[in-house]
Structure formats: C-alpha cells, structure tokens
Image: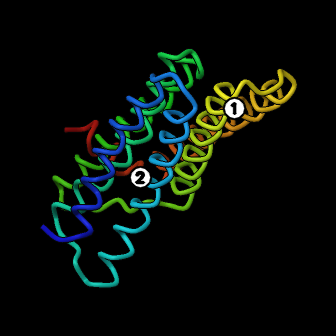
Amino acid sequence: MNLPTRLTLVRILLTFAVMALVFMPGVSAKAAALLLFLLASLTDWLDGYLARRWNQRSALGALLDPIADKVLILGTLLAFVQLRMVPAWMVLIIIVRELLITGVRLFAASRRIILAAAMEGKHKTVSQVIAVVAVLVLLLVRELGTAGETIATLEGIVLGCLWLTVILTVVSGSSFFWRHRAVLLDAVHR
C-alpha cells in the first residue's frame, strides 16, 4: 500500500477521533478536534497531490479517497446533529446528494464510464469543510466561556456557512444530474 492510500486511511481514522473529541467536555478536547479535523482535511489534498506527483495512483486509492471524504464530512456533521449544533434536515440533504451521486457513479463505472468531479462539487466540498471548521470554532469558543455577543456572532456565521453548504450541495447535485442525464436515462431504462 502506497503513502497516498495510507493518508486516505488516516483520514478515516482521524474522523472517529474528531467525532469522539467533540463529545468530550473541555477546551483541550475541542481544540484537538479542530486541529485533527484540519489535519484530516489537509490529507485530502495531500494524498491526491502525492499520488499525482509520485505517479502512485491506484485503484484502491481511487476507491477509498471519495469514501474517506464522505466519512470525514458526514461523520462530523452527524456528530453535530447529535449535539444540536446543526439541523438534521440540512445534513439529510447532504447525505441524500452524496448517496445518489455515488450510486450514479457506481452505475457508470459498471459500464466503464468515469464521471469526473466538476468544479461545483469542489466548491461544495470546500464549503462543507469551512462549515465544519466554523462549528468546531463555535464549540471551542463556547468551552472558553466567551461573552454571549461573540457566541451570537459565531452562531450567525455558522448558520450562514451551513446555508451556503446546503445551497452548493443542491446546485452541484443538480448540475451533476443534468450533465450526466444520459447515464441516468440509461439506468432508468435497464
């Protein structure tokens, strides 16, 4: 197993650490969750960069990378739902989009068609990372016992980030389905 694939596996393991830490009380737990999430997000970029740079692309890495991305984002968002930091309906929209697109990609792959990621999907992913970071910062600031005015401002920023993420999720999903409607029609007629 090459280094890029190992980094992808590390991202999955870091997700469980982040999820555990957000449920633990204390500033150090919340700070560690934020730092580990940032590290896990960095591995998303790093594994792809190293695979391309060192020409170490593999079928396993190509399979695991998008799974690791989804585990990181969705796992963390689900933890936030449990903490009542994020509305469940927003996370449900994100989950449904990811499952539908993964299903279409798997169907296309079974037909030896590769459906590449588009720029809208990359923007969606960046917005999700920013939204998760914003929630983690809010959790950290709450643990620090910061003034209510600062917390209210951060809550507004978190809500704005979440709305942007949901909008980009819907837009990127709609764009994906429109762009690949021929594959979808083929799937329906089978």
N-term mark: 2 or 1: 2
| Residue at 30% from the left image edge and 56% from the top image edge | 65
Colouring style: rainbow
Residue assigned mark 1: 141
Displayed quadrant of residue 137 = top right
Q: Position of residue 129 (x, y in %)?
A: 55, 47
For residue 130, above or below residue 122? above
Say which element carries label 2.
helix
Mark 2 residue crowding within 10 angstroms, few (<14) / some (14–19) / many (20+) = many
Q: Which of 122 and 159 is in front in this view?
A: 159
- Quadrant containing the C terminus is top left
Mark 1: which amino acid?
A: Val
Total tally of numbered discs in the picture: 2
CA gap, disc 2 and disc 1: 21 Å
- Relative to residue 29, is residue 67 depicted above or below? below
Q: Position of residue 59 (x, y in %)?
A: 16, 64
Q: Badge 1 local density, few (<14 within 10 Å), some, or many (20+)?
A: some
- Observer-nearest of 28 and 96: 28
* Residue 124 numbered mark, or none: none
Query: Front-most of 188 and 130?
Result: 130
Q: Nearer the viewer, residue 60 or 18?
A: 18
Amino acid on which the number 2 mark rests in the picture: Ala
65 sits to left or right of 152: left
Instruction: Give left or right: position of 174 versus 146.
Output: left
The residue positioned 33% from the left and 79% from the top of the image is 52
Task: Give percent across and percent down for residue 80.
Answer: 51, 24
Tell me what residue is drawn at x 24 percent, y 53 percent.
Answer: 9
Q: In this view, does 138 lie to the left or right of 16?
A: right
